[in-house]
Amino acid sequence: MLISYIRNLISRVKESSVFSQDKRPIIFFGFIFVIFLSVTHFSLYPAKTLASGPSVTTPENKGETTPPVKVITGFIKKGETLSEIGEKYNLKADDLMDISRVSKDLHNLRNLQPKMSYKIIVDTKRNDIVELDYAIDDSSFLSVKRPITNDNGDDGFQAEMVSLAYQKRTGTIAGTIRHNLIESIGSTREHINVAYELADIFAYDIDFTSDLRKGDTFEVVLEELYRDNIFKGYGKILYARFTNDGERYEAFRYELNGKEEYFRPDGNSIKKTLMRAPLRYRHISSFFAKNRFHPILRIRRPHLGVDYAAPKGTPISAAGDGIVFNAGRTRQYGNQIFIRHSGGYVTGYGHLSAFAKGINNGAKVNQGEIIGYVGSTGYSTGPHLDYRVKLDGKAIDPLKMKLPTSPIPAKHKEAFKSYVAQMRIEISKSRMAKVSPKPANKLN
């Protein structure tokens, strides 16, 4: 069509008297140039085609034995269910039911969270779901796959949790206590987690409810987790320093016999027989006293423990390794648990709303293990934990007790000493390099 048009145009030009004989060569080359531009335009800008949709792609099938598949990707909408996603993409309902069934022990797919991503791979020949991946959080995702079988076989789906890899860098968070630890470190989710972990590290020496002083200082050297150069959160605390009321505490994370623990610079373990306080979310509502006015009995009597006010249902941890005894209910203390520890120590936990699963007389518990939940049973004016400690049968103040520490084994002392020296060099470098970024820069 284009060539016919050009031929007609040339004929008209030849018949025209406007153009003289000597200008025809110029006109001829001009038409040649127009033809060149036309051909170039059609070769560089072919007709555009519309894709079927951004959420569904069909990869090229290069292998003869692999069935053709399509890949469905997207983000969960508010209130969206797995069955609704199945209806949207015409997926087999039986496949989705099987996927939910095999993955329920790892993650309940009936509770999909908005803005979390998913990927579904479908065999287009049989419309079978081959794989479903669902992002749980920034660190892991649920992967449900159908094993490759022959056309007559089907081994069902298999589910697993997959951890996501991060690029790790070293950062520092440092500051001064103004009112409380969380406010001083930061109120974002990432900083709150750091504050809790820091409090757990020094829980054997400092009660972060009663012992903090304005002007106390802290420094934390920790892992920063990145993916594709985007900050995703914090990892392990490698070193921590806290100066409380003029006294300096330090902790180094060190692997010993395949297990990572925190040690002081002198090689003694941070961990002690008992923790100072057996729960995180708390404030002290009543101290250890030998003459306290009881708010319900309306009399003065000793209060040989510490009351920690906390919301009902707050988890309570075992203060140390031991064996449960006298777990039950009394009129005064409601639901209560007592644990016998080594060294003659006994701890008591009163007014619980409920016991944790498996907590009964004779049960062995580990330090930090959840044993029950805060409540207001017995003689109580509100939800709180009545925490008590006895040594050789005598009540002692949990906030003032002095506990022995255990040293690192002698054969590991030199290696630990070298590690501490190297860590101090790295800490100095980290201080000079930068302060850890605020999660406000975090992108989803």
Image (tube, rainbow, N blue to C red):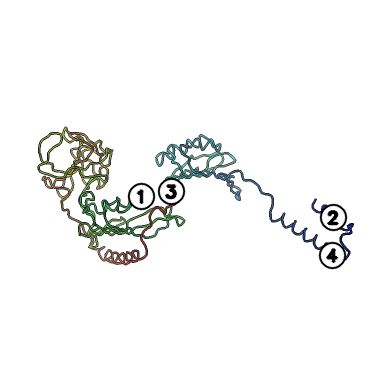
Residues under labels 2 and 3: Cα distance? 68 Å
Contact between labelled residues 3 and 2, with CB atoms less than 8 Å apart: no
> Exactly how many numbered labels are in the figure?
4
Please identify, in this view, whether the residue under mark 2 or under mark 3 is nearer the observer.
Answer: 2
Measured Cα–Cα span from mark 3 to mark 4: 74 Å
Residue position marked by numbered label 1 in the rendering: 188
Marks 1 and 2 sit apart, C-alpha to C-alpha, by: 75 Å
Which residue bears the numbered disc 2?
Answer: 7
* Residue type beneath disc 4: Pro
Where disc 2 sits, the SS reads helix
In front of the other: label 4 or label 1? 4
Looking at the rendered image, the disc whose residue lies closer to the viewer, 3 or 4, is: 4
Label 3 element class: strand
Residue at image coords 13%, 41%: 303
Q: Residue furthest front?
A: 18
Which numbered disc covers residue 162?
Answer: 3
Query: Eyeballing the image, is 45 above or below 354?
Result: below
Residue 237 screen position, x and y as percent: 32, 56
Using the image, determine if residue 405 lies above or below residue 56.
below
Earlier in the chain: of badge 4 and badge 1, it is 4
* Tag 3 and tag 1, C-beta contact below 8 Å: no
